[in-house]
Amino acid sequence: MATYTASCCFLDSLLIFSVLTAFSAAQNISGFTANLYQRDAFYNPNLSQTEMIRRAVARSVWRANMSSSITPNSPTAVIIRDINQFFMKIRLGTPPVDIIAVVDTGSDLTWTQCLPCTRCFPQRLPLFNIRASSSYGTIQCGPSWPCPPWNDIECSNGLCHHDIHYFDGTHTRGLLSKETLWMDSTAHSAIQIPNYIFGCGMDNIGNLLGTGSGVIGLGPGPESIVTQLGHLIGRKFSYCLMPLDPPGRVTAQNISGFTANLYQRDAFYNPNLSQTEMIRRAVARSVWRANMSSSITPNSPTAVIIRDINQFFMKIRLGTPPVDIIAVVDTGSDLTWTQCLPCTRCFPQRLPLFNIQASSSYGTIQCGPSWPCPPWNDIECSNGLCHHDIHYFDGTHTRGLLSKETLWMDSTAHSAIQIPNYIFGCGMDNIGNLLGTGSGVIGLGPGPESIVTQLGHLSGRKFSYCLMPLDPPGRVSHIHFGDWAAVRGPGTIMVPLVPRRSGNFYHVTLEAFTVGRTRIPFTSRSGSVEQGNIIIDSGTALTNLPRYFYAQIKQAVTMQTHAPEVPDPYQLFELCFRKDRSLQLPSIVANFRGGNVPLKRFNVFVTWGSATCLAFGVSESFITYGSLAQQDFLVGFDQYARTVSFKPFQCSRA
């Protein structure tokens, strides 16, 4: 089968089966933008900068010292059936319903996602409901009547099934079926083909087609639409694919992006907090987070450190009717989850819990011997339903149902965007203070369960954010997906992402920090710079470094700062100087493999009370480039290009 590249344009061109037919395009939304909220300022807009930093750093330090054994994903198959930029419209069933699917000369079997569906990726049109069609039928099989001898077809429990796998772990599985096919035509009235054989996909993982629902196979095999249409087309067809820009064509509406807001946590919930108190709270969260490493062992498969608190929140909506969810945005997490009713144990949060019984579009994900749960970390099958069970080293955990629901993304540029069958975790048994006033996590990681992957062509596997520093009051910054996520122009540094086996993180190579005129290489014990030695993590405030490397940076800062050292009034940082307007601090540059990122003073130093402190943490197990270092930078992730880009920017304008 041919492999195609995703495009922002669907089929506007002419596809002809002998005398058949011209089809118009489906709507395509190639990108969008959501707003990011800084956690502390969002919930308490009046928190001081000091308290916001203190809270963020405390979270970061706690997180940095946690690690676990993370099982790498194991790609399994041939990615020959993949997304394509040209779609065709057919109709199936009685009464007929529209199906928008990829046309592919490299495929034979036509298949589409169907209800009832245990797992389905997002698509624009409703799923095909086999129970709503009077002409739908399955294809039986047994010792005396085997299934058709086609690729990826097998007999199970007396019925023929298709089971198509892809190299990235994406796959579709379901019933080989027969149905009435209707072909629209600009030359004739609708053409009806009874007993058309196709695959009804009821268990689908990944981002195979974005807003499309399946594949229409134009190959030469016996199962292709070309063969099954028989004498109607004489095994002949032709097409004419238009370029993207000729005027006067019928084209799909293209929405290239949308925007939502970022909230600072403490300032959002308490507008009267001082800047000092906001910094103090942020740092305290980071310090608490980093100090959780003492009990970590390599054999702790259930303690996943990447799902943790974060100081920046994003607002989404779930359900029908939609309700607001304020959750942490975290590049170190994949699965989105939120606390739900009915809840046996839930920690405090500011907004009402999500009530699954109040939503008409909520669904669980069934499982069994023939329908396993998605092969994701912390997912298991119990009593016929998929559950998530995520544990943390401090005893905090969330447990509940892996679920599917309609996701709504607000936008300041366009109307709300609706994503059906979004897979997330519904936490119904939660212990601890994982997020404080937040309700869950929005995972921005590279895994198949992350929001970036599930949004499909809407994100194009690209996103960018701009995290504001703590001192501009009353402002929000944004997170962008898709076409609007590009980070380019003067001053942009592009750093290659490095694949690692330790889970779904964004690893890059940090070669050194330059303090003033002193370059301090980040070498391993062997004396060389290790590939992928640091993680870009929006989920922790501090940049966390091994003790030996931190000690060299601390020494260089001390030698180049001519001011008396003082103890940290909050006992969170090791190196502090007396607060003074005339205090001269050395510049610090992050030297990545790919380019150098000069950091501003507020990226590496925090001032509270009578002290100005070096805002780096110490961790031997979880080395992170945290959100403080990323503030007032456009930070863009491109999973296909495998890059992360940094560009200095005033994030209040993002």
Image (spheres, helix red, strand yellow):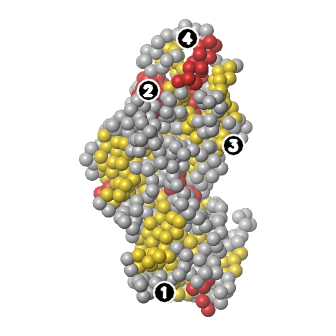
Find the distance from the CA under tag 2 to the CA under tag 3. 34 Å
State which tag comes first along the sequence, 1 or 2: 1
Would you call the spot at circle 1 few (<14 residues within 10 Å), some (14-19), or many (20 or more)?
Answer: some
**Residue 20 horizontal/vertical position (percent):** 64, 84
Which residue is painted at 27% across and 48% down in the image? 343
State which tag comes first along the sequence, 4 or 1: 1
Would you call the spot at circle 3 few (<14 residues within 10 Å), some (14-19), or many (20 or more)?
Answer: some
Which residue sits furthest front?
526
Camera-nearest label, 2 or 3:
2
Which residue is painted at 64% across and 13% down in the image? 560
Find the distance from the CA under tag 1 to the CA under tag 2. 65 Å
Which residue is painted at 41% across and 44% down in the image? 301
Res. 115 mark: none
Find the distance from the CA under tag 4 to the CA under tag 1. 82 Å
In front here: 639 or 148?
A: 148
Find the distance from the CA under tag 1 to the CA under tag 3. 53 Å
Q: In this figure, which residue is indicated by the disc labeled 2?
A: 287
Res. 488 mark: 3
Q: In this figure, which residue is indicated by the disc labeled 1?
A: 195
Would you call the spot at circle 2 few (<14 residues within 10 Å), some (14-19), or many (20 or more)?
Answer: many
Find the distance from the CA under tag 3 to the CA under tag 4. 37 Å
Camera-nearest label, 2 or 4:
2
Q: How many marks?
A: 4
Would you call the spot at circle 4 few (<14 residues within 10 Å), some (14-19), or many (20 or more)?
Answer: few
Q: In this figure, which residue is indicated by the disc labeled 4?
A: 580
**Residue 397 position (above or below residue 254):** above
